[in-house]
Amino acid sequence: MTERDRQYGRPCFVVEDSPALALEPLPLKAGDDAKDEAWLQRLIHRSPGVLPITQLEPAFAYHEFKAVSREVPTPRGLIDNLLMTNQGDICLVETKLWRNHQARREAVVQALDYATCLFDRGYEAFEKMALAGKFDPYKVPKSLYEYLRHEGPEALAEAEFTDAVADNLRR
């Protein structure tokens, strides 16, 4: 058992009424079965819940982020993953693997650079960029509202949703 295991415990897969299965870290090695940044982008796109978003920003605990698209084109490059809530909250994800020693610094600089590309955009320009990204294996929606819309007491009308996104872009 390593020091890290003792300090934080070991991640486990738990199914009710079955013994917990200790999980092993994925090797991030070179080769045919390598786990690279594209693999990580696809994982986040299929399962955005793997990100600890609410640990970074507790205010997002009340609305679930949904993957919108990958490799979203901006004038400064491609946003690796774009996530949003049905309330118009926006999350940009820049993926870097830990074996990349400049990962933390590069990720922060790139994310800030991409964010500045979005600040000056209105809803229509932002939506156009978001819909130009990769949606695979999902079908490209006609609009962000259509894609993120939900039913229920907190459901926003389309005008409210576009206003919320526009407000978040200004912030």
Image (cartoon, grey):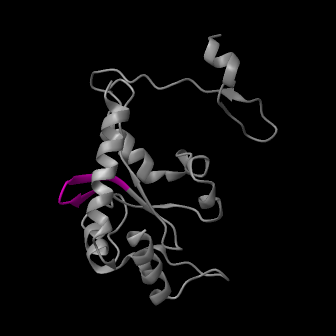
Residue occupying image coordinates x 37% and y 31%: 97
| 99 lies above or below 75 | above
Q: Give the farthest residue toward the right.
A: 17
Type of secondary structure dominating the magenta stretch? strand
Figure disc tally: 0
Horizontal placement of 105 versus 85: left or right?
A: left
Which quarter of the image is occupied by the N terminus? top right
Instruction: Determine which quarter of the picture holds residue 2.
Output: top right
Query: Residue 39 at x, y = what percent?
Result: 35, 39
**Is residue 133 visible to us here?**
no
The residue depicted at 55 percent of the width and 50 percent of the height is 53
Residue 52 against residue 167 in the figure, above or below: above
Say if the magenta span includes residue 34: no
Q: Is residue 139 left or right of residue 55?
A: left
Residue at (52% x, 24% y) in the render: 25
Q: Position of residue 147 (x, y in %)?
A: 43, 74
State whether residue 74 appears in this view: yes
Q: Which residues are magenta?
A: 71-81
Q: Position of residue 108 (x, y in %)?
A: 36, 42
Check the picture and name the quadrant holding the C terminus. bottom left
- Among the 4 quarters of the image, the one containing residue 169: bottom left
Q: Is residue 84 left or right of residue 155?
A: left
Position of residue 70 relative to residue 142, above or below, is above
In the rendered image, residue 79 lying in the magenta stretch gets the answer yes
Q: Nearer the viewer, residue 77 or 23?
A: 77
Which residue in the rendered view is the most extreme toward the front? Answer: 171
Q: In the picture shown, does residue 15 fall above or below 151?
A: above
Q: Residue furthest left?
A: 75
Which residue does the image show at 37% across and 47% down from the upper left? Answer: 42
